[in-house]
Image (cartoon, helix red, strand yellow):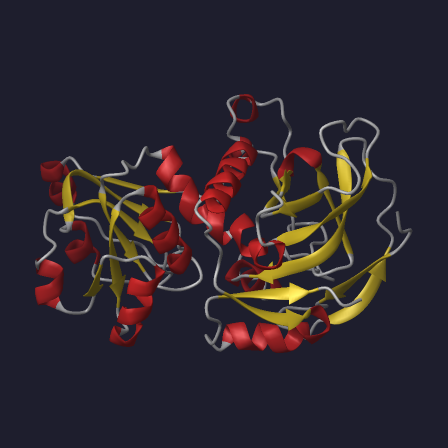
């Protein structure tokens, strides 16, 4: 167990990341220490890097899609062992005694601690977490590409569990990007008939390859009208404003529009439109440890993996600029080269 951890940190909003060293202190009794093999980058890392949410502490080491091997365990940890390969996502600690934790909704704990909120994350050679938030990887899973499953993957998989999406449901996925491409894969394997919405017609063939049965241009009124009243569940993975009335109109009776993309502007809703269809609107963050474990089992069984591009961790600033420019197809994984 190292006395000093190395990581790539920003000293101010939007700053270039530079290698720093910090002393992590004693390992907590319920913690494990992970030697990082790889770590994904997602837009939440950029939001934290730029302090868009007003909660970033500097120096800031991001990284919350970690794959690595446990190299040390706390005195109270018996469910994880040294040498296990695990994944770590957005959250790294919860209280384990509140009503939400006791109900299995640890991700909704009022005291939940994000892996990169107020602490250092996985753009480093080592990272620590409460053991329950680490998920062992099956040997059959491709560890090199698995990191994004632990943030983006669980974000789009969790709603299917939370809301009992039927395997015979007709579902829509809005946005074919870092979240949306994984949603297409998961929902197709779930058994659903999948309709992909995109404003980029050039992505049609790609969406079909990723699992969509049908692709609709979300800016074409005629194509949108053809879906009226036909979708049981619509998953919104984008963070931009759209014609929400037209999208809600695609819902079948008792249909649901569900947000996992952090749309920053208010979403106007015509209540009569919702009432007459007995429709629902909802949102969710990532997921609980048990749901993450379920996702890992499902992804392994159906051979679902994110589509990733690789950079060495020493080229992290290049990788961040690649993501900022919207060039990632569709997730980025940093491979540790300390």
Q: Is residue 103 left or right of residue 335?
A: left
Extreme residue in the right direction: 3
Q: Is residue 141 left or right of residue 313?
A: left
Split into 4 quadrants, where in the image is the C terminus? bottom right
Q: Is residue 107 left or right of residue 12?
A: left
User: How far across and how far down the image is residue 56, in percent?
Assistant: 63, 57
Q: Residue at x 54, y 76 (%)?
A: 322
User: How far across and how far down the image is residue 109, in percent?
Assistant: 55, 32
Q: Residue at x 65, y 53 (%)?
A: 66
In the image, 185 versus 95, the foreground residue is: 185
Q: Is residue 332 left or right of residue 238?
A: right
Q: Toward which corner of the image does residue 233 lie, by quadrant?
A: top left
Extreme residue in the front direction: 140
**Is 60 placed above or below 168 here?**
below
Q: Residue at x 12, y 54 (%)?
A: 227
**Is 259 placed above or below 308 here?**
above
**Is 305 placed above or below 323 here?**
above
Q: Toward which corner of the image does residue 255 lie, by quadrant?
A: top left
User: How far across and how far down the image is residue 319, in percent?
Assistant: 60, 74
In the image, 225 versus 329, the foreground residue is: 329
Q: Toward which corner of the image does residue 4 lie, by quadrant?
A: bottom right
Q: Residue at x 62, y 59 (%)?
A: 144
User: How far across and how far down the image is residue 245, in percent?
Assistant: 17, 55
Number of numbered discs overlaid on the protein picture? 0
């Amino acid at each position: 167990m190292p006395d000093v951890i190395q990581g790539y940190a920003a000293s101010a909003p939007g700053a270039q990341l530079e290698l720093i060293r910090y002393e992590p202190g004693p390992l907590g009794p319920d913690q494990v220490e992970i030697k990082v093999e790889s770590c994904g980058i997602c837009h939440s890392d950029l939001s934290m890097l730029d302090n868009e949410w007003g909660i970033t502490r500097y120096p800031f080491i991001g990284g919350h899609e970690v794959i690595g091997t446990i190299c040390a365990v706390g005195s109270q940890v018996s469910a994880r062992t040294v040498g296990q390969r695990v994944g770590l996502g957005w959250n790294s600690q919860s209280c384990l005694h509140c009503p939400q934790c006791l109900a299995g909704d640890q991700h909704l704990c009022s005291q939940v601690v994000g892996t990169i909120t107020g602490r250092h994350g996985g753009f480093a050679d080592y990272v620590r977490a409460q053991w329950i938030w680490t998920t062992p990887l099956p040997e059959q899973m491709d560890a090199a590409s698995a990191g994004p499953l632990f943030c983006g993957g669980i974000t789009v998989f969790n709603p299917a569990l939370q809301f009992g999406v039927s395997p015979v449901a007709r579902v829509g996925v809005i946005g074919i990007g870092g979240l949306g491409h994984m949603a297409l894969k998961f929902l197709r394997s779930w058994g659903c008939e999948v309709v992909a919405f995109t404003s980029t017609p050039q992505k049609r063939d790609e969406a079909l390859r990723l699992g969509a049965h049908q692709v609709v241009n979300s800016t074409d009124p005629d194509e949108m009208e053809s879906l009226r009243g036909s979708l049981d569940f619509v998953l919104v993975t984008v963070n931009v404003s759209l014609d929400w009335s037209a999208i809600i109109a695609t819902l079948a009776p008792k249909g649901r529009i569900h947000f996992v993309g952090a749309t920053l502007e208010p979403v106007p809703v015509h209540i009569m439109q919702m009432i007459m269809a007995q429709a629902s609107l909802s949102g969710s963050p990532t997921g609980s440890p048990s749901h993450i474990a379920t996702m890992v089992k499902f992804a392994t069984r159906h051979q679902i993996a994110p589509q990733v591009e690789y950079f060495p961790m020493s080229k992290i600033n290049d990788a961040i600029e690649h993501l900022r420019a919207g060039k990632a197809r569709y997730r980025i994984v940093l491979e540790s080269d300390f």
